[in-house]
Image (cartoon, rainbow, N blue to C red):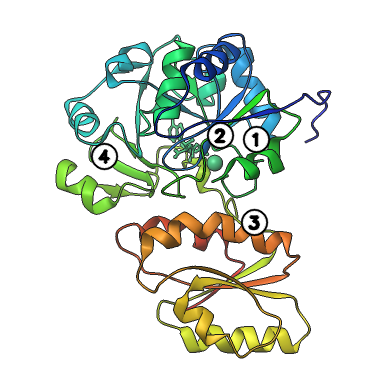
Amino acid sequence: MGHEEPPLETRVIPIDPEAPDAGVLAEAGAIIRAGGLVAFPTETVYGLGANALDDASVRRIFAAKERALDDPLIVHLATAADLGRVAADVPALARELAATFWPGPLTLVLRKRPEVPASATAGLDTVAVRVPAHPVALGLIAAAGVPVAAPSANRFTRTSATTAAHVLEDLGGRIEMVLDGGPAAFGVESSVVDVTGEPPRLLRPGALTLEALERVAGPLALGPGKERPASPGMMERHYAPRARLVYIREGGVETLRARVADAVALGLRTGVIGTDLDAAAVAGIEGVHVAMLGVEGDHASFAAGLFAGMRKLDADGVELVVVRRPGTSGLARAVDDRLRRAAAEVVE
Ligand code: TXA
Ligand code: MG
């Protein structure tokens, strides 16, 4: 898949993440209304926004990202009160989840209204919707005056962008504007829940924990159902760095150290993404590239730094990355999901 549009000048506009400038938001909103593309920060990752109700605008997102057309987008709203613009039917459970968790890192899959173009939903009769918890995102959507389709602002097959620099790396010259509101807080994408059937399904674990969801919704089914297409963010190696990623079981610090030592001995440019424990374990091995994300057990820091760590090690030219599973509950569930998809080899 090639990208054949002539390059655009991508304007990067710094913006206060707490108190965004109304003039900048108005200008960015006008670009979206006119059919353009604006990348913006959310609390999860950066999004690449376009008018969700306009087929040509939505198609530009796919072209810029070189994204497969069968991978549906998330439609972002400024308020749950706008749900009726895109969703045909909002079950009681969806209303309760929205009331509890929006604005926030929860995406609900609902029956779609005909006004949402098929390009945005990959031809499905459902639409994914969320209200993000970020003043810049909310201000931009309100200024645009239309629902905003926004996938993560990375090139297809690359890890999600958590900073404006990542967006530029992947999409510079392909989009009109990037609003730079600093690094995204969560660092992993929203949790995607399909509420069109019984029981509701967690299609993609994300920044809102399963534990929190189940306190409101009761037990969720996990993963795509048999009769439904998989949530395509679920594609294999979707979140992979360029380097070969070896994924070590939880607690396997000594295994990690040994794998790193072997790789270095073979002359491979080797990296580690991990906690202070991992960094200490490989401290005696010369030439290892370490992305240290935080102290052992701090899952929020691990999630926040994971994609940036992958990009940094790629930029260092690392050929093999070794990562140890941080855990499988709370926020670590989403991290574990991304790492399993990124892994070329899993060492249990
Ligand atoms: O945190 C996030 O969700 C970020 C920010 C920008 O909001 N967005 C994001 O979008 O991660 P994207 O396009 O990278 O991932 C969208 C996910 C995919 O896994 C896709 O398959 C799923 O949502 N999805 C979208 N529409 C769907 C639908 N109608 N049915 C099932 N899954 C759907
Ligand atoms: Mg994505």
Is residue 13 shown above or below 169? above
**Disc 3 to disc 2: CB gap under 8 Å:** no
Q: Position of residue 192 (x, y in %)?
A: 37, 40
How many angstroms separate mark 2 from mark 4 (CA)? 21 Å
Which one is closest to the eye, mark 3 or mark 2? 3
Which residue is the site of mark 2?
71
Quadrant position of residue 34: top right
Q: Identify the amino acid type marked 3.
A: Arg
Which one is closest to the eye, mark 1 or mark 3? 3
Q: Nearer the viewer, residue 112 or 135?
A: 135
Q: Earlier in the sequence, mark 1 or mark 4?
A: 1
Q: Nearer the viewer, residue 206 or 11?
A: 11
Q: Earlier in the sequence, mark 1 or mark 3?
A: 1
**Disc 1 to disc 4: CB gap under 8 Å:** no
Which residue is the site of mark 3?
311
Quadrant position of residue 60: top right
How many angstroms separate mark 3 from mark 2 (CA)? 23 Å
Q: Identify the amino acid type marked 2.
A: Asp
Whether disc 2's CB lies below 8 Å from ligand 1 is answered yes
Mark identifier at residue 200: 4
Label 3 residue SS: helix
How many angstroms separate mark 1 from mark 4 (CA)? 27 Å
How many angstroms separate mark 4 from mark 3 (CA)? 34 Å
Q: Residues within 10 Å of mark 3 (few under 14, many from 20)?
A: many
